[in-house]
Image: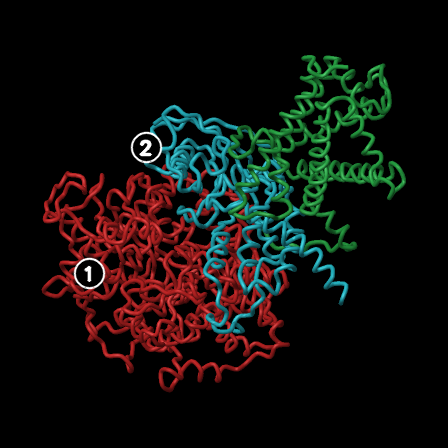
Amino acid sequence: MDLTLRVWRQHGPNQPGAFEEYAAPDIRSHVSFLEMLDIVNDRLSLEDREPIAFEHDCREGICGMCGVMINGQPHGPQQGTATCQLHMRKFRDGDVITIEPWRATGFPVLRDLVVDRSALDRIIEAGGYITVDTGSAPDANLVPVPQEAAEASMDAAACIGCGACVAACPNSAAQLFTAAKLAHLNLLPQGQPERFMRTEAMVDTMESFFGSCTNHAECEEACPKQISIDFIALLNRDYIKAKWRNGRLAGQR
Amino acid sequence: MQLDAKIPEGPLAEKWDAHRFSIPLVAPSNRRKFEVIVVGTGLAGAGAAATMGELGYRVKTFTYHDSNRRAHSIAAQGGINASKNYRNDGDSDYRLFYDTIKGGDYRSREANTYRLAQVSGEIIDQATAQGVPFGREYGGLLGNRSFGGAQVSRTFYARGQTGQQLLLGAYQALARQIKAGSVKAYNRCEMLDIVVDDGRAVGVVVRDMLTGEISSHSAHAVVLATGGYSNAYFLSTNAKASNATAIWRAHRKGALFANPCFTQIHPTCIPQADEFQSKLTLMSESLRNDGRIWIPSEIGETRPAGDIPDDQRDYYLERRYPAFGNLVPRDVASRAAKKEVDADKGVGPMRNGVYLDFADAIGRLGRDTIEARYGNLFEMYERITDEDPYEVPMRIYPAPHYTMGGLWVDYDLMTTIPGLYSIGEANFSDHGANRLGASALMQGLADGYFILPNTIAAYLSQYLGTDPISTSELAFTRVEADVAGRTERLLGVNGSRTVDWFHRELGKIVWEHCGMARSAEGLTKALAEIPALKEEFFADVRIVGDGDSLNQTLEKAGRVADYFDLAELMCRDALHREESSGGHFRVEHVTEDGEAKRNDEDFRFVSAWGFEGDGSEPSLTKENLEFENVELKTRSYK
Amino acid sequence: MTTTEEAPVRRRYPWPIEFYRSAVGKKWVMALTGVALLGYIVAHMIGNLKLYFGAEEINHYGEALRDLGGNLAPRTHILWALRIGLLGAALLHVHAAYSLTYTNWKARGGRYRERDYIAVTYASNTMRLTGTVVLLFVFFHLADLTWGAAPAAPEEFFRGDVYSNLVASFERLPVAIFYVIANLALAVHIFHGTWSLFQSLGYSHPRFNIWRKRLAAGLTAAVVLINLSFPIAVQTGILKI
């Protein structure tokens, strides 16, 4: 099929960018969206034009590197699918496809469709872990974990850290990411000792980079792993408790 | 050159403990005086960096990813083995060791493999404490599945995302150390060379991928945890950025490269659908537990799968290997599929696959059970192929997946360059000629969490009181200039073909001649074609853009440039190894019924290749493998 | 290259202030004040139904409000306490909304050229607009029927005669139209608000999540049906002096 791409081009951070239009003729419908971009890039190279920079790696929907806004939808029109697993059969001959980078103050554009998502790492560094030095763990079966808790935790832990939730949010909030990370640990017995310190630290760090959740639920629709906003409710509840408890603990110190 | 694997004396089960006791310790207060560089932040790298940070060493990590959570360890689906024997089904350290060494076709070291089995249980403890949400039974205790044909249930899993969850555990542990300040993380920073001074590794030269700046970092020791080199085949299940530059550069600086021809071809991947396909997607091996593999009996069959009656189907694995059936090890299943497709019995639009059929399982267990077990895999298959595997059988075909070969390391995981360590898939040590399912995660974490952080003390303790050499020394500036020169050379070619074109061409050669079946004739041909293609690459590659900003084509080109040489070494090793063992199958060395024929008499050794300069033949050093605890048997799955 | 950087350490305040400084805390405050305001809206609406029972009933109702507490408290004191509470809730609700809007505006890194929302509803997307309309209306409504300040209030305004004041006010067509628009805005506002407040307070459960939606829809329907009935009844002559 023959397509027209309208792509955001920007040479570097803090530089002006603009949309450019590229013809993408003769694309077969069973190639993936990123393979379509590969083909376009190869053609651009041979015309001595700079290829479009975009991020990708595993191309099987798990590493979380890829992700662009495709026709106004994060990761494109297919729900529960990362950009790399989107295939061109979801488009029609003659389509004009608008491709934009994630846009959020917390995700500055580095080049073309590549944005800096290291703010998400800062959130994890703030407390998204269980403090256990290598070698100090007790036998794995010492603490039984109810199957439902393990399953719910896994539902949250499926997050791939792609940033689509931030990109989708009209407020550029990172609530779904943070909530998923928190719920992963807060739902497990192993995560209890640090539960409220973790919650407060991660949410406060999140808010220093991102907007606030106003419960649009757009993130849930954009999430390639379809993580539920119920976890955001858990985040809110834990945060309220955390402020109270941690303050009380601090007072006792 | 004489290779000393430094395997400790004593009975197999006591070697590791005895060795740990013999290693000189670095006192806690002295650890902060040592700097260690870790390149790569996958399971092995993140695990090692986090653990060394916890111990008090000052660690720098480097990754070309934007975050330490992206490495391709994340894509491992099935699970991780451990000899916990929670199922009371007769598992033990010894049995895991035995299965691993037998599965590796007796081409790995007894001592290393036994140690791997020994620490396997601790990995599960550690990961569970970190909050890895492993699958559980109703009683709340850990669940296990049997995996990859193992006759005990020792595989722990977190749905179909075990690698992801284990990597997130290691990443979170690393994040804690980054926060604590013991680890400094350099992201979007690609290691392009290693610096060796006075015969030991003293640092690395890296390129800042956003600004193109080349800089040096020095340390007391350097750890390479940069994964495998399956992307030499272009089409593999590896991530697009996975590359061999770090280990290849180390090899060029003097580290021996062991068993490069031992590559694993995974049997259950989605077949290629287009010439522009960029990668192959793996479907978990666990599918073979319930799926039946077959092809039409007739050559040139055109009917859809559902219309072919049972008596005109050939369930070739069940027919040829009645004992193991569809659960034969990966190398056997892969070769069998190739044999059928080569006989033109392949299915699908490109006639390049075999059927993996769930109709019987659905009939027996019901659609709901199958959905509970494999739902996410089926969805993934449908997304990619637009076919519904509940209705029509899946099409699968083998694809390059894992490389057992890698940098030669001794028992301490140190390469032949003192101070340079290699862990995880980047080294060669534990899997021999074939890796069993659910063992890669185990090895990466064993190396990273439990082995390297202990053994590295043996080297570091010698250098207490010395500072790492300054990066303004000639040793560093020379390498920096060399790296800058390589970048300039690539940018200066301005030819007429894209990097991907060359990579794809290289992949075709390696896949054809050094893939599932190898012959002296083919390998010789490849050894002539690869250098020619490399020459063409440096004369005709086109890289648009500059070297001082984000340039993904330039990054790719540097990686491909190193693949030419590595591919050549793979073929050379394959040509030299006149036997069929594990993933290495030489058509000249087969039994009467066409099965692999190992030659323990002449090839019971590790081939460790040394770099002798561009254009010169590499040198071969052999490390003989001694088997004191297992009897060498022919693998039979009939 | 991106490396780890140190976050600045800032002074910590007592926890209620710390809590309100955070966006999650502000949303919590918005939810709680929202509950108070919703309660007021429902009570006000139910009380107003007395209009249909005649002038005497509704005027007695107004009197009863002023006399809340009966002999137990000084006259109008409880009413004033409620009013102050309500005012406080409204102020906090508006301040939190304003400050979150500013935060979110700063967090947004430019607009997309194309944006195809899936979950965002008209209600969730217009909370700021509908909120502002309701706020402006409240001022007018107070001037009209509580303070009796012209020109918002009709000339015939007589303090205490709730029934006549209301009918006189709604007989003016523009006022009736403004009332209808404002109550539609209110309905839209509480449709998202009612569902959303559970989320902000952290009450989410697969089993009752469907009831959150039903409650929101029910409240919205009630507000539309009942509140809009008043100006319509006046305009159509069902209610007259």
> Circle 2: is it few (<14), some (14-19), or many (20+) Cα within 10 Å?
some
On the same chain: label 2 and label 1? no
Residue A28 badge: 2
Q: Quadrant of residue A27?
A: top left
Disc 2 chain ID: A
Q: Quadrant of residue B628?
A: bottom left
In the figure, the cyan chain has which letter? A
Q: With C93 as the anchor, is A210 left or right in this view?
A: left
Q: Are marks 2 and 1 in contact (CB under 8 Å)?
A: no
Q: Quadrant of the C terminus of chain B?
A: bottom left
Q: Which residue is mark 1?
A: B325
Colour used to depict chain B in the structure image:
red
Label 2 and label 1: CA atoms lie apart by: 38 Å
Task: Give x and y (percent) for residue B35.
Answer: 58, 68
Vertical side of C223 occupied by A53: above or below: below
Q: With B299 as the anchor, is B69 left or right in this view?
A: right
Task: Give x and y (percent) for residue B289.
Answer: 27, 58
Colour used to depict chain C in the structure image:
green
Q: How many marks?
A: 2
SS of the residue at dot 2?
loop
